[in-house]
Amino acid sequence: MERNTRQRSAIREAIAQADRPLLPQEVLDAAQQAVPGLGIATVYRNLKMLVEEGALQPVNLPGENPRFELVGHRHHHHFQCRQCQRVFDVHACPGDLGGLAPQGFTVEDHDLTLYGRCKDCVPSNDKPARRKTAEPGGHTHTHPRRC
Amino acid sequence: MERNTRQRSAIREAIAQADRPLLPQEVLDAAQQAVPGLGIATVYRNLKMLVEEGALQPVNLPGENPRFELVGHRHHHHFQCRQCQRVFDVHACPGDLGGLAPQGFTVEDHDLTLYGRCKDCVPSNDKPARRKTAEPGGHTHTHPRRC
DNA sequence: GTAGCTGCAAATTCTTTGCAGTTGT
DNA sequence: ACAACTGCAAAGAATTTGCAGCTAC
């Protein structure tokens, strides 16, 4: 049976409080406010459990490590700010994209990511809104051109 | 100055021959046909160089390790087969998506990934077309719902 | 009381880097 | 000749797993 530990509650709560998908490290930082001794392995284990039991859903963006958010947000996409690197939900969708694939291919689903500046990082503002996740050396950022 | 080694030629050639973006390991496998002793570190080093000099571009899909393809394909998107996991180019685009983001957000670019079955993996066929990249244990596959 | 959970440390996977030897030009 | 390049092995970063002790029920 599944238990209700301080750790699990703190992790679930950290994600519920956030207004955007969080990285495992961000979940750890937030949940440690409530449970100081909390370890990163426990965060990973609980994120996996919570996803499996349907409480959370992973948010995978191109070239980014997985983030996590509550389920219940129905089908939606994401926006990543090029300045502060944070990710936000976008509750809009271009609609049916079945016609875009080559002949003979069957399209079942799609993922869409928008890039630009978030409300807190208007183009003139050069300092990130809040913290900026340290840029891992190996990250090759794709900068897709305009359509 | 930049040199012309057997290794670099083999790597460039492997990618030029492929009809789809390749993972570093796939590049290694292909290039080793021409240069048996080739090491994976050399592949990574050359992929990085070739990207920096503008010969290659990285292809990042959600939750996937980076793949590489030749540049020159103008703005395009990608299709991943749910059966064989291979990735293909899609030379179509839904167009302007600037209207989808929340108030105050500025959209500069976008990434789109389609999921479904490729031509070789029609829905009735349960065996992957060719090789299937071993499924890394940690991979949380997002299965976005229909729009 | 005991199965489930936790923290720590070791293991994995993917990628990068240090180094000594090799090779284009 | 000599700087660029290569293979190997060690180092890194993100994530997973083994294990002995802890704790919710």
Image: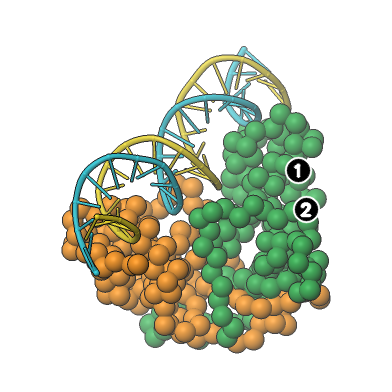
Chain colours: A green, B orange, C cyan, D yellow
Residue position marked by numbered label 2 in the rendering: A18
Q: Note whether A51 is above or below C4 in the view shown.
A: below
| Identity, as a three-letter code, of the amino acid under mark 1 | Ala
From the viewer's side, name the closer residue of B93 and B15: B15
Residue B36 appears in view: yes
Tell me which residue sits at (33%, 67%) in the image: B2
Q: Note whether A110 is above or below A5 in the view shown.
A: below
User: What chain does mark 2 sit on?
Assistant: A
Q: CA distance from mark 1 to mark 2?
A: 9 Å
Instruction: Pinpoint residue C16: horizontal percent, then vertical percent.
Output: 45, 51
Instruction: Pinpoint residue B107: horizontal percent, then vertical percent.
Output: 69, 77
Tell me which residue sits at (64%, 46%) in the image: A24
Q: Is residue A146 left or right of residue B15?
A: right
User: Which type of secondary structure does the marked residue at label 1 adopt?
Assistant: helix
Q: How many marks?
A: 2
Residue position marked by numbered label 1 in the rendering: A30
Looking at the picture, do discs 1 and 2 lie on one chain?
Answer: yes
Instruction: Pinpoint residue A90: horizontal percent, then vertical percent.
Output: 71, 70
Tell me which residue sits at (32%, 56%) in the image: B42
| Identity, as a three-letter code, of the amino acid under mark 2 | Ala
Tell me which residue sits at (77%, 53%) in the image: A18
